Image (cartoon, grey):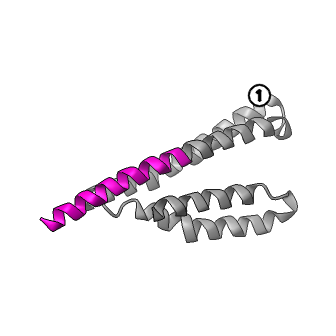
Amino acid sequence: CALNRAVHTTILTMYMCTCFKSCFNCERVYVLEIVQYALFDPTKEMAYIPLDEDSKQKGKAAIDVLGARLGKSGGALIQQAIVVYTGSILGGAPLIAALFSCVIVAWIASVNKLSVLFQAKLKAMQSAEAE
């Protein structure tokens, strides 16, 4: 599925970018922005294609407004708690890396599930159009 491949490519690229050494900070920011606008955002919008207009509007509002804000705030809160618990950012780095890897695995699993649901909804739309 194109959605699956695009998201996996995005995740892999973002993971590789975060593994660069700190001397490449500027380039890493540029690459992450390029990946976000070229791959992630269009892929995110593809997930709304088989939905009706009301579901698209409600889904976009929930994801873009609520999900993005809670995701950023929650991530910052977890990172700050780890830093406070371990005493320094370097002390918490292994734990943050482990959590990051778990999130990547969960993300890939959710993308695979979304792909299955997307294909089922697409087939249902095609069969409804054929009738």
Q: Locate the C terminus and report the quarter of the image it occupies.
A: bottom left
SS at badge 1: helix
73 to 35, vertically: above or below: above
Q: Does the magenta stretch include residue 117?
A: yes
Kindly give the residue lying farthest to the left in the view shown.
131
Q: Residue at x 51, y 51 (%)?
A: 68
Left or right of 19: which side holds 69?
left
Q: Which residue is drawn at 20% across and 61% down?
A: 127
Residue 45: horizontal and vertical position, in percent? 43, 64
Residue 51 visible in the current orientation: no
Q: Residue at x 17, y 67 (%)?
A: 129
Q: Which amino acid does label 1 sit on?
A: Tyr
101 to 124, vertically: above or below: above
Residue 106: horizontal and vertical position, in percent? 56, 42
Kindly give the residue lying farthest to the top in the view shown.
85
Residue 87: horizontal and vertical position, in percent? 83, 31
Query: Quadrant location of residue 16?
Result: bottom right
What span is colored magenta in the figure?
108-131
Left or right of 38: which side holds 16?
right
Q: Does the magenta stretch include residue 118?
A: yes
* Front one among 93 and 123: 123
* Front one among 68 and 40: 40
Residue 97: horizontal and vertical position, in percent? 74, 41
Q: Which residue is drawn at 34% across and 64% down?
A: 49
The residue tagged 1 is: 85
Q: Locate the N terminus and report the quarter of the image it occupies.
A: bottom left
